[in-house]
Image (cartoon, coloured by chain):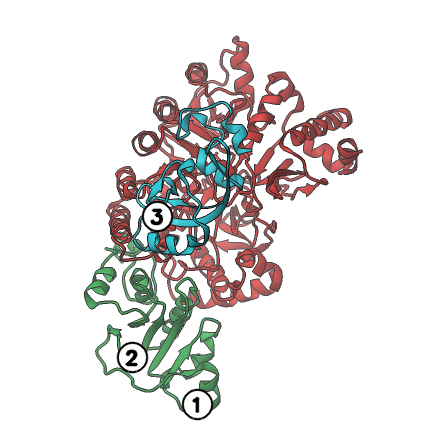
Amino acid sequence: MKILTGNDLGSGHVVWWDGEGWSRHVSDAVDVGDAAEAILAAEEAARRVNASYAISATKAEDGTVRPDHIKDRIRALGPTVRPDLALQPSDPQSGNWVI
Amino acid sequence: MYQYDQYDQAMVDARVEEFRDQVARRMAGEITEDQFKPLRLKNGLYLQLHAYMLRVAIPYGTLNGRQMRMLGDIADKYDRGYGHFTTRQNIQYNWIKLEDAPQILADLATVEMHAIQTSGNCIRNISSDHFAGAAADEVVDPRPYAELLRQWSSFHPEFDYLPRKFKIAVIASDTDRAAMRLHDIGIQIVKNDAGEIGARFYVGGGMGRTPMIAPVIREFVPVLQMVSYAEACLRVYNRYGRRDNKYKARIKILVHEIGADEYRRQVEEEFAHILTLGLEPPAEELARIQGFFGNPGLVDGLAEGYDRSDPDFAVWVDQNTTPHKQPGYKAVVISLKPAGGIPGDATADQIRLMADLAEAYSLDELRVTHTQNIVLPHVKQSDLYALWQKLDEAGLAAANLDLIGDIIACPGLDYCSLANARSIPLAQKISARFAEPERQRDLGELKLKISGCINACGHHHAGNIGILGVDRKGTENYQLLLGGSEAADTSLAQIVGPGFSEDGIVDAIETVTEVYRAQRTEGERFLDTYRRIGMAPFKEAIYG
Amino acid sequence: MVDHCLRYRDDEPVGDPAVTVDAFAEHGNATAVRIEPGDDARMLLPQLGRIALIEINFPAYGDGRGYSAARILREHGYTGELRAVGDVLIDQLSHMRRCGFDAFAPDKPITQEAADKALATWPEVYQKTVDGRSPIWALRHGR
């Protein structure tokens, strides 16, 4: 699947396009198909996102979305060396999800 | 230490207001990200993997307790309770909000600090010897010269849009503790046969993807022409430095392509012209600045020696302190490299504690080293034990200075948008593998440096053992290099062979240390043995 | 003539079209020249006296060669109009003025009010350049 990501302009938070707005949780990301360019242009122009781009990802059976590239998985999770700072309560397995 | 006067303060305050206005214009949509990016970068504000990152300048790595305390407070108030000390002798915060950035700069300005020119294609924060003012071997304290250059390079109207970033280091000892020849301009303050002070200019060094050691461009520039000579060096670079390819835009490429002799000829021609313009600050200005770097309060007549009866203390004091030019004192290095820890990271509480300790024990001075440690430069030997106890309680007494556990590591793919691989987990694994103190000390001086991409922020080219993280078809892979040094005997490390996985390279490093132990002769450091026996025995043992 | 030009000099704007540095060297009767980033401003030094307008083009604001070109011309005594053209943004005006520019013709117009505000950003300056301002080191020592 093709998903969209970027950072919130003011806070810098990593965000993912959920079909209506920007979520901080990667598993809210939706497949945008061919619409990536149009959505990003509109959202950047409205300053609802900054430094945005489209990436490939895979949806697992349990509904979690896993970006194909490690860099975006680290963005989704937080620094692998500081699980205490992860967006969601730290899960010992999360490091494996990244690698 | 240097103190701002009303002029310095007004410049920093003006910068805060300028940036406040620029951020407001960006938030309101009056300027695009493309237009805003170079403006925020010139204030040290990057957009990294998780948030904005702010790099705060610590000019020539020197700061006082009040400034250090502010760095701790900023970590709590605007970040997530910690900061990262970098190879540029600066500090970075990883979780900054754009909305907060102008106020952070305003807070910094209250303690005579800023983030000016800590990024962008301009003259960056000037680095120096972290033992300046304390080192027994210095000709003079190099920091007044660095401060003179700081003021000259701040908001320099001609050199704000150079082909690429530009880094200057100033030292004043034959022992290079600042990787001076790996800078765009390295200046060594020297004394000539007539006893006059001058500046030896090395130009065109650097790390990055094409590491080069800077050649001497002029042996002796009279000290009251130093700024003019630097101006000439920059002008020739601004005119001819390549702008067609970002990776060939540093001055090292220009000096390499046209040759040191031709570059020197052009600089001398420009220098002769610049001397006619009267751009150089007068002797009174240098004297004014030097007035701030006089005796910070060192007392005469103290005895040498201290009670070494606590064995843990004795180990630390032997490893982490160095001789001071004043009898009865030592310079202390606080290692930010606990076994299994994140190199260069310190919590807000640790930062504030180090501020307190500087005030109590080091004449209110601290230094940040390019090896990502903190120095208390002026500690009475009679205070060493009390200081050590307080550091130990706070987890800041790792006795591993210049040992294999004292690893330099860039933030890597855990934080950095340029990285190809993670650096920190590797540093953690290596320092954990070699955590046993006796084992580290048996291996002796061994400088291990890790970069997560070829931009080389982790100085892997200059590591006795260097590691370069690369992306191999989407997985992290690590190349091993041997034989680099950033000291006066500067050399560039060479790649050993095919790369490794994360665990593989930890094993390979262990193999390298075993070869060294088997081959070393009496008193030989790792680097000495490597230089004597060459790459082959190591390669054989690793891949054989 | 350029539509949107901010000028910080009192004489009448020069209306002549600016020619390239090469064309100027060949023909020699033009009074207005346009310098591109790759041109060496020092080529013009022998004939500065008969030039009334030098335009320095910034195709992209990030290419800073024009700052050195401007300063070199002023350092060698050029007193005619020195105009920055192209991708000239408000945040660069102050530095440009310090390097000797006294006219600006940006691709995207800048209002006089915004320009005046930008030029007043810095209360004092650290370097001596060609703009006649006393640097901070001179003020400190009563020079």
Residue corresponding to mark 2: C2
Helix, strand or loop at label 1? It is: loop
Q: Badges 1 and 2: C-beta atoms under 8 Å apart? A: no
Q: Is residue B360 above or below residue B167?
A: above
Chain to which mark 2 belongs = C
Q: Which of marks 2 and 3 is in front?
A: 3
Residue occupying the point 48% across, 66% down: B239
Helix, strand or loop at label 2? It is: loop
Quarter of the rendering occupied by the C terminus of chain B: top right
Q: Is residue B53 visible?
A: no
Q: Which of B263 and B467 is in front in this view?
A: B467
Q: Can residue B450 be seen in this view?
A: yes
Quarter of the rendering occupied by the N terminus of chain B: top left
Looking at numbered disc 2 in the image, what kind of residue is underneath it? Val
Q: Which of C29 and B472 is in front in this view?
A: B472
Task: Report which quarter residue C109 is drawn in.
Answer: bottom left
Looking at numbered disc 3 in the image, what kind of residue is underneath it? Val
Looking at numbered disc 1 in the image, what kind of residue is underneath it? Gly
Question: In the shown orientation, is residue A75 left or right of residue C111?
Answer: right
Q: Which chain is green?
A: C
Residue corresponding to mark 3: A49
Q: Distance between the residues labelled 1 and 2?
A: 23 Å
Task: Report which quarter residue B539 is drawn in.
Answer: top right
Q: How many labels does the image show?
A: 3
Residue B433, position as x, y percentages in the image: 62, 22
Chain to which mark 3 belongs = A
Q: Tell me the colour chain B is drawn in.
A: red
Question: In the shown orientation, is residue B179 left or right of residue B58?
Answer: right
Residue corresponding to mark 1: C28
Q: How crowded is mark 1: few (under 14 residues within 10 Å), some or many (20 or more)?
A: few
